[in-house]
Image (tube, helix red, strand yellow):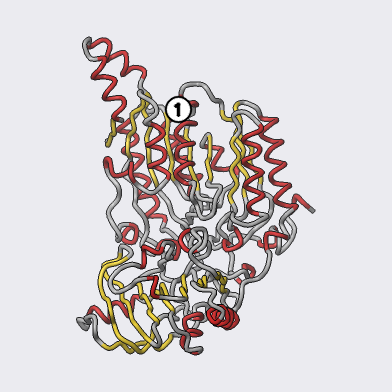
């Protein structure tokens, strides 16, 4: 059993500490909450094979002891809010830190899922009794033979703690959920912003709600709706309408009505699971009629604005490169070419345009090619060596073809948490970062390493859907932003009907059909 005794509680016992019976009285009032995380955004259509126990421990071993309380962004928010209370003890359950490849990694094996879940449940049994459980999840995990992994996690925790101990979960906006999670858990808090600036805040909200339930001050009553809309993640940016309006409507309900929490998930369409598509979760304090009324309103509003969710189509690679050349000529730099369609990390469509159009001042950050990294390592490559290799494009056709890059290796070492990445200078002031797995560059400081200084470049080619806006758009850094789509109906593009779903009837969702309950 791994425990964390909050500093506020320790201090209160010291101050009280004259009489043993006083300390015992304080201990009797103490709440004990178990905390865990098991989080993955799974691209079931991505190549590379299933994610087993080895892949789940390749980046680092599981969190144990106090490590869990600094894991991710939800849990630190949860822990900080718990420090507002002097009578709460947190118990960390051993939890996996993350899977190698991130959101480009495919299905988690059932063996891996059971392995890590059984470990944390054993920790929970050792810690019993507890007064509450906090599940820091994602919502878009996909596991072989487990249709709804997050709901299954909640179900197995419920089996251990019994029917009366509250369970609260937090989720990413891309969660694939339906009513099954709230069948076993009491509340679900989902980020309202994409990029997810508010994950810390949702952790805080989860903590305060869990305390209120445990003290008998809140009786969760819930309602879940599936509006029947499925969207690619690039269209889920909450910095523009109507997505902005959907989240504002949720916040408005929370402000208008007392003790109401409204969560909206857009879903993650690259997981072949039965609960894809948008979800609305509403939680009230023992008011089912209100929960249903708000859930219906939110679901119907999403349905009303469904056409506007799809907006203008992103540019194809050749057109995007032409737009970048025009913007460069007019001085509208820095320029970002956001290659949002690249789920595997090895797409070369935009990089090929950089080469073919002889663009200058471009930092391509990044292209995944573990084969190149391995070849450089085995040859003992050093900065200053000439570089002449084909890069990326190995998941054809959805990734394009390998691109020949001739230049100079200027860096080969640690970056982005990987032991080895390569930086190659080529053409006219161009640089390419090669990584062993998909890497979304979000912040400028991430690409300040080795010889790289982002201020020396005019154009950035990034592999990102929306998260790049944190460092390049919403900071005011970039003057021109161009979204780039792949030239075909591949993994990651808007063309979801090109995906070989086995567990999803796509015609049950707009824009590919009409949901059965709306016909």
Q: According to the image, label 1 marks what residue?
A: 211
Task: Find the residue positioned furthest to the right.
Answer: 519
- Please name the residue shown 23% across and 78% down the image: 377
| Vertical arrangement, residue 303 with respect to residue 253, above or below | below
* Frontmost residue, 448 versus 250: 448
**Residue closest to the eye, 235 or 337:** 337
Number of labels in the image equals: 1
Residue 221 falls in which quadrant of the image?
top right
Residue 366 on image: x %, y %: 41, 73
Task: Indicate whether 121 appears above or below 233.
Answer: above
Determine the secondary structure under disc 1: helix
| 100 lies above or below 376 | above
In the rendered image, residue 495, in percent from the top left (x then y), is placed at 63, 70
Q: Position of residue 55 (x, y in %)?
A: 34, 61
Judging depth in this view, the residue of 279 and 201 nearest the camera is 201
Q: Is residue 38 left or right of residue 422?
A: right
Quadrant location of the N terminus?
Answer: top left
> Dot 1: within a 10 Å radius of its alpha carbon, few (fewer than 14), some, or many (20 or more) residues?
many
The residue lying at 51 percent from left, 85 percent from top is 353
Q: Residue at x 56, y 48 (%)?
A: 177
Residue 239 placement: quadrant: bottom right
User: Taking 408 as reference, is 273 above or below it?
Assistant: above
Relative horizontal placement of residue 263, taking residue 446 as reference (left or right): right
Location of residue 513 in the rendering, given as x and y in whole percent from the top left corner: 73, 62
């Amino acid at each position: 059993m791994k425990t964390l005794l909050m500093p506020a509680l320790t201090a209160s016992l010291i101050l009280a500490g004259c009489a043993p019976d006083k300390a015992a009285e304080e201990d009797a009032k103490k709440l004990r909450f178990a905390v865990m995380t098991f989080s993955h955004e799974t691209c079931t259509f991505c190549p590379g094979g299933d994610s087993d126990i080895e892949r789940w421990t390749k980046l680092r071993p599981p969190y144990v002891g106090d490590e869990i309380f600094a894991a991710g962004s939800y849990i630190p928010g949860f822990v900080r809010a718990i420090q507002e209370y002097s009578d709460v003890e947190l118990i960390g359950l051993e939890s996996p830190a993350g899977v190698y490849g991130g959101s480009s990694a495919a299905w988690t094996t059932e063996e891996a899922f059971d392995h890590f879940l059984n470990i944390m449940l054993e920790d929970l049994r050792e810690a019993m009794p507890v007064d509450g459980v906090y599940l820091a999840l994602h919502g878009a995990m996909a596991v072989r033979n487990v249709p709804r992994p997050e709901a299954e996690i909640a179900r197995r925790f419920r089996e251990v703690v019994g029917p009366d101990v509250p369970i609260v979960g937090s989720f990413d906006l891309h969660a694939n959920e339906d009513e099954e999670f709230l069948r076993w858990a009491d509340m679900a808090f989902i980020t309202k912003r994409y990029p997810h600036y508010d994950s810390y805040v949702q952790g805080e909200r989860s903590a305060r709600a869990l305390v209120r339930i445990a003290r008998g001050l809140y009786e969760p009553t819930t309602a879940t709706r599936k509006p029947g809309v499925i969207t690619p993640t690039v269209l889920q940016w909450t910095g523009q309408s109507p997505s902005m309006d959907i989240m504002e409507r949720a916040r408005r309900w929370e402000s208008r009505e007392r003790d109401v929490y409204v969560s909206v998930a857009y879903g993650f369409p690259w997981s072949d699971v039965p609960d894809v598509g948008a979800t609305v979760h509403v939680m009230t304090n023992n008011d089912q009629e209100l929960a249903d009324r708000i859930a219906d309103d939110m679901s119907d509003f999403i349905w009303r604005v469904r056409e506007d969710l799809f907006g203008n189509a992103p540019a194809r690679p050749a057109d995007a490169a032409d737009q970048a050349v025009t913007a460069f000529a007019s001085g509208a730099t820095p320029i970002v070419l956001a290659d949002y369609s690249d789920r595997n990390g090895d797409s070369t469509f935009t990089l090929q345009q950089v080469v073919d159009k002889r663009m200058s001042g471009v930092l391509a950050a990044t292209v995944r090619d573990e084969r190149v990294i391995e070849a450089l390592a085995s040859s003992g490559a050093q900065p200053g060596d000439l570089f002449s290799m084909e890069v990326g494009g190995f998941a054809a056709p959805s990734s394009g073809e390998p691109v020949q890059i001739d230049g100079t290796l200027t860096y080969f070492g640690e970056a982005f948490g990987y032991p080895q990445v390569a930086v190659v200078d080529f053409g006219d002031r161009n640089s390419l970062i090669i990584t062993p797995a998909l890497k979304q560059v979000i912040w400028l400081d991430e690409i300040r390493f080795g010889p790289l200084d982002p201020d020396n470049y005019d154009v950035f080619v990034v592999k990102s859907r929306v998260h790049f806006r944190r460092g390049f758009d919403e900071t005011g850094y970039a003057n021109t932003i161009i979204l780039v789509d792949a030239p075909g109906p591949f993994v990651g593009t808007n063309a979801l009907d090109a995906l070989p779903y086995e567990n999803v009837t796509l015609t049950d969702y707009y824009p590919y059909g009409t949901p059965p309950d709306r016909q």
